[in-house]
Amino acid sequence: MNNKTIVITGATDGIGKIAARELAKTGATLVLVGRNAEKGNLVVNEISDLTSNKNIQFYQADLSLLKQTKLVCDEIKKDFTQIDVLLNNAGGFFADYYQTEEGLEHTFALNHLNYFVMTKELLPLLEAAPSGRIVNVSSDAHNGQSIDWDNLQGENGFKGWSVYGRSKLMNILFTYELAQRISDTTVTANCLHPGFVKTKFGDNNSGLMGIGMKLAKSLAAISLDKGGATSVYLASSPEVDGISGKYFAKSKAKKSSDVSYIENDWKRLWTVSEEAVSKILN
Ligand SMILES: NC(=O)c1ccc[n+]([C@@H]2O[C@H](COP(=O)([O-])OP(=O)(O)OC[C@H]3O[C@@H](n4cnc5c(N)ncnc54)[C@H](OP(=O)(O)O)[C@@H]3O)[C@@H](O)[C@H]2O)c1
């Protein structure tokens, strides 16, 4: 048993679920956040039975919606006074353009703004822990992408894979800027590539894109256990105590793409994100 509290988004499947299972074994209290309450409660029971950890709770929210994200953070803040780890993991690849009911492009809302809001809302609880950690699941799919500031939400021409790759670049820019902003606290922020993992990633897409994703995963993807390993490492290993502002893969720090180190872009993304969020939450 340990007395850590770990919040994981998108813990009902794939990499988030595997990370939840492994982190449950450490005896930590787990807060699993997802959109499907029935599936969430099944996952809680499954992991609880498997690990004998009874301190696992599910919180429901559609994380592509900023208002629901804020509300679920409010619930967590009511129930906990400190959080040791926030694992921002929920995300997906959407081949087609789709706007959420809040008027945001879906990938931008779920893959980036959700991480942004979860982090800002829960930061005081992470600061209340002795050494809080923020772990953002990004992807090597950010390579070759750059932010198209005039088409941030794909309104002027939407290419699903580029939009996905850019959202994963945003995860890195966000992490690097965040690490700077919290450098005078005991909280760290890192991001990671989990590998190409045999999850349900991309299966939501119909037609050739959906078939192609399934085929590619059956040929080349790594197991779920391997896919969750770097998230678990960053959330729990003493080896990363005090390390912040880095990109990891295979549980080792590595270089992200050259464009991800442009500090002006870190700051610009932060400002643009604050503006987008305030239009909806204020
Ligand atoms: N798989 C890969 O090869 C790969 C590679 C690089 C990076 N990644 C990243 O890894 C992360 C996890 O992906 P995965 O491969 O584990 O995919 P997955 O198997 O599809 O799991 C995604 C998780 O996110 C949740 N989710 C999706 N939309 C949500 C929403 N609107 N609100 C709340 N929860 C939502 C899903 O909930 P449901 O159970 O309700 O569907 C599920 O728990 C993503 O950030 C992805 O970009 C994956």
Image (spheres, rainbow, N blue to C red):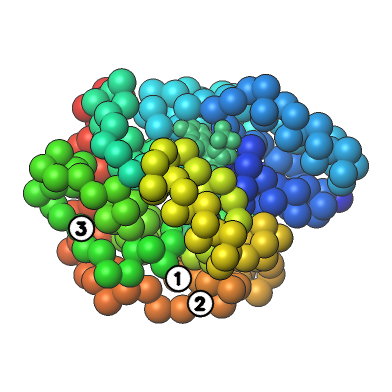
Q: Is residue 166 above or below residue 219?
A: above
Residue at left offset 63%, top offset 23%: 37
In the displayed structure, does residue 14 sit left or right of residue 142? Answer: right
Q: Is residue 145 above or below residue 22?
A: below
**Residue mark closest to the camera, 3 vs 2:** 3
Q: Say which amino acid is labelled 2.
A: Ala
Q: Which mark is residue 147?
A: 3
The quarter in which the C terminus is drawn is: top left
Q: Is residue 185 above or below residue 159?
A: below
In the displayed structure, does residue 141 sit left or right of residue 72? Answer: left
In the displayed structure, does residue 37 sit left or right of residue 211? Answer: right
Instruction: Tell me residue 185's x, y (percent).
Output: 47, 58
Q: Which mark is residue 246?
A: 1
Distance from label 1 to label 3 (Cα)? Answer: 20 Å
Residue at left offset 33%, top offset 44%: 95
The response on whether ligand 1 sits within 8 Å of label 1 is no
Element under disc 1: loop
Q: Give 70 or 157, whichever is nearer the viewer.
A: 157
Element under disc 2: strand
Mark nearer the N terminus (1 vs 3): 3
Mark nearer the N terminus (3 vs 2): 3
In the displayed structure, does residue 194 sit left or right of residue 232? Answer: left
Q: Say which amino acid is labelled 1.
A: Lys
Mark nearer the N terminus (2 vs 1): 1
- Please rate how many residues cluster around mark 2, counting C-alpha atoms within 10 Å: few if below 14, some from 14 to 19, many from 20: some
Q: Give 244 or 56, whichever is nearer the viewer.
A: 56
